Amino acid sequence: MTEKDIRNIWIFIFFVIISGWIGVLVDSVLVAQPEGDSLGMGIWLILPLLTALIIILFSKESRQGLGLKPNLKGNMKWYLTSILIFPAVTAIVLLIGAAVGWIDFSLFNINAFILAFCSILLINFIINIFEETAWRGYLTSQLIKLNLSDLKLYLVVACVWAMWHLPYYLVFLPEADIWAVMPVNRVVYAVVAFTTFLSWTVMFTELFRVTKSVWPCVILHTVEDSLINHLVISGYISIAAGKEILISPINGIITSILYVVVGIGIRAYRTQSNKADQSTLLNVCNHPNCSI
């Protein structure tokens, strides 16, 4: 990777960090902005991907690294996995919570929940095309070229992802939604959310690397937004006071540990698969008729 490529990564990170604050500034000038759905939030959402596309255009980079091809062949199991990860982990967390008496299901209505879940899938899918193409398709793919260790890769992506979310947690997100998840102020919630981003980054990064496509990540993120956020914020379950940090399906410690385990599992599969491919290639090259 050239110095120009590294410079482009820094340019991307800079505009990612300021994108939300530009949106905050816009909202402070415009009046009567709808809470949670303002023009500033739109700027915050689209600017990272727009920045990546402009960098690609002016640096004449190939768009192939963005992972826009579905790569369905050989990856159908990962598409299925992307659909099931959040429901499976959430089910485990809810069972644990119910078993120890930390989660109450008395207000849960399965029919209403399924209807609401399905009604927001499409809009969340569209939103996450912007987010996942920026984080996985551009940032992650560019950082991989630096040959960083997996841990450093996770940390850099998680930190940038979290810093991008700061204006969301500190300004855009309605305070009532924060209190529905965890009874803390905005700053504390943003700090807690960083651990969530770190645990998710392992999982999202490895899913992108094993499939070489952003689309399983878009699906994974869409299911998450439509499932666990709605489950908690809309009040379908209630969590015992003081236990949110442990068992919350959104950012509880137990939940985050499970997502790290999932991510490490995908990484183990990827590394073993890469070793098998290298071994096969080595055996072919050792063949007398090898022309590689």
Image: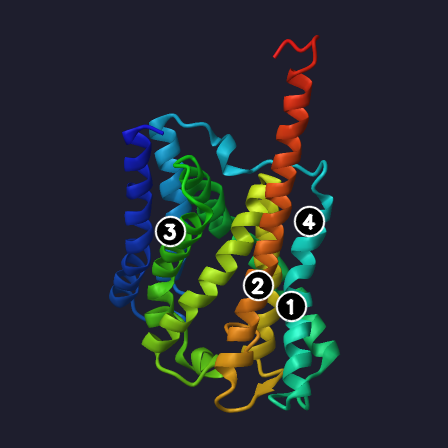
Pointer 4 local density, CA inside 10 Å: few below 14, some 14–19, many at least 20: some
Residue matched to label 3: 156
Residue in front for this viewpoint, 109 or 14: 14
The vertical placement of 199 against 102, above or below, is above
Q: Is residue 105 left or right of residue 144?
A: right
Please state if 222 lies on the left or on the right of 144 as rendered.
Answer: right
Tag nearer the camera, 4 or 1:
1
The answer to whether mark 2 and mark 1 are in CB contact below 8 A is: yes
Contact between labelled residues 1 and 4, with CB atoms less than 8 Å apart: no
- Labels 2 & 3 near each other (Cβ < 8 A): no
The image quarter in which residue 99 lies: bottom right
Q: Position of residue 28 (x, y in %)?
A: 26, 67
Which mark is in front, 4 or 2? Answer: 2
Q: Residue 123 vs residue 87: left or right?
A: left
Which residue is at the front of the view, 258 or 236? 258
What is the three-letter code of the residue carrying label 4?
Answer: Tyr
